[in-house]
Image (spheres, helix red, strand yellow):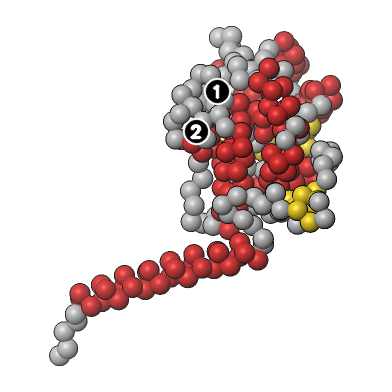
């Protein structure tokens, strides 16, 4: 009777694992090469007939799926960082559990870490909606909302929050990809991370910076579910709040709750609101005065501009 040499089997097993790992890496490198993505740095300085070349990040990525909802009123919202996401979470929490706000809590006063309905009305899939019904996705009475935002304003808001925040030690490596307030460093690292994530979605773990800076088209499985959503434009305040309140009225939300939401949205600002800050104006000017930085931003968020009908800044460039 032959005896099994466990040491040889173990060595063979380790060899096979290493072989598979190397094959995966080579496959990913081949994909990246075919899609003309430069991992070290976006080749925005390459020119052809004096025209800058922008190599854009791929569209749609099913990996950033977060939802908030109220079953009582059958409203679901796609959770998109820097798009009034925490306030929207509070609104849906208020609709489902209004008694939690009897002590004077405002929907605009909570932070993400201290949100009122933390892990209560939050899902990573919309399948729960159909578990108890035979209605199809197109016939059910749920409303699907997604708040969208001009990619430039959204990036600047994320940069101030994650990279230039006076309340946080920016020298910590887990903030801003370790860039410590450096705008060029941040944009290059965002481009690199998004490129790697797209081709390694099952092998790379996402971090907080990824969630703050990932394109909006990468959220909530839009490649398959785009047709379900009503999009509310956060970059147009005059119509945004009217549209949001209109949805609540259509869903027969109690008037007292609508009034609370309306008043607090109108007269309050979230603690990290940045749109009118001097930092926002400074970074905006820096981007528009540096075509190379703007080319990086367009390369990352090109499909956000196109998909949600935002105007791309007018620079002399070529999309590849």
Q: Name the quadrant of the C terminus.
A: bottom right
Looking at this view, is 48 or 212 the one in front? 48
| Residue 109 falls in image quadrant | top right
Q: Is residue 228 left or right of residue 218?
A: right
Residue density around tag 2, few if under 14, some if 14–19, many if 20 or more, within 10 Å: many
Q: Is residue 173 left or right of residue 166?
A: left
Whole-percent x and y of residue 112? 55, 26
Q: Can the viewer see residue 89 in this picture?
A: no
Q: Is residue 120 above or below residue 141?
A: above
Q: Is residue 52 left or right of residue 278?
A: right
| Residue 163 falls in image quadrant | top right
Whole-percent x and y of residue 136? 73, 52
Q: Which residue is situated farthest in the bottom direction here?
A: 1
Report the residue marked by disc 1: 165
Report the residue marked by disc 2: 175
Residue at 69% x, 23% y: name it. 282
Q: Can the viewer see residue 178 in this picture?
A: yes
* Mark 2 touches mark 1? (CB < 8 Å): yes
| Residue 188 falls in image quadrant | top right
Name the secondary structure under disc 2: loop
Residue at 55% x, 64% y: name it. 29
């Amino acid at each position: 009777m032959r005896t099994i040499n466990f040491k040889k089997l173990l060595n063979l097993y380790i060899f096979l694992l290493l072989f598979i790992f190397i094959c995966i890496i080579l496959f990913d490198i081949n994909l990246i090469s075919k899609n003309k993505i430069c991992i070290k740095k976006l080749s925005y300085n390459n020119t052809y007939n004096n025209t800058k070349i922008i190599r854009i990040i791929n569209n749609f990525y099913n990996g950033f799926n977060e939802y908030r909802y109220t079953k009582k009123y059958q409203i679901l919202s796609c959770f998109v960082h820097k798009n009034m996401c925490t306030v929207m979470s509070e609104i849906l929490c208020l609709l489902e559990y209004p008694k939690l706000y009897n002590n004077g809590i405002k929907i605009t006063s909570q932070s993400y870490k201290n949100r009122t309905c933390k892990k209560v009305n939050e899902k990573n899939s919309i399948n729960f909606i159909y578990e108890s019904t035979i209605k199809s996705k197109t016939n059910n009475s749920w409303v699907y909302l997604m708040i969208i935002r001009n990619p430039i304003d959204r990036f600047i808001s994320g940069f101030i929050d994650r990279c230039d925040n006076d309340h946080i030690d920016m020298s910590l490596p887990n903030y801003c990809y370790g860039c410590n307030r450096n705008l060029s460093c941040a944009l290059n690292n965002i481009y690199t991370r998004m490129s790697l994530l797209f081709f390694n979605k099952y092998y790379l773990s996402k971090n907080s910076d990824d969630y703050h800076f990932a394109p909006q088209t990468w959220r909530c499985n839009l490649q398959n579910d785009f047709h379900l959503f009503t999009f509310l434009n956060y970059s147009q305040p005059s119509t945004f709040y009217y549209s949001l309140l209109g949805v609540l009225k259509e869903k027969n939300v109690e008037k007292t709750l609508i009034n609370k939401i309306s008043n607090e949205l109108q007269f309050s600002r979230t603690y990290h609101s940045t749109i009118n800050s001097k930092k926002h104006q400074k970074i905006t000017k820096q981007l528009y005065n540096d075509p190379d930085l703007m080319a990086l931003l367009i390369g990352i968020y090109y499909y956000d501009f196109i998909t949600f009908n935002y105007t791309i800044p007018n620079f002399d460039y070529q999309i590849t």
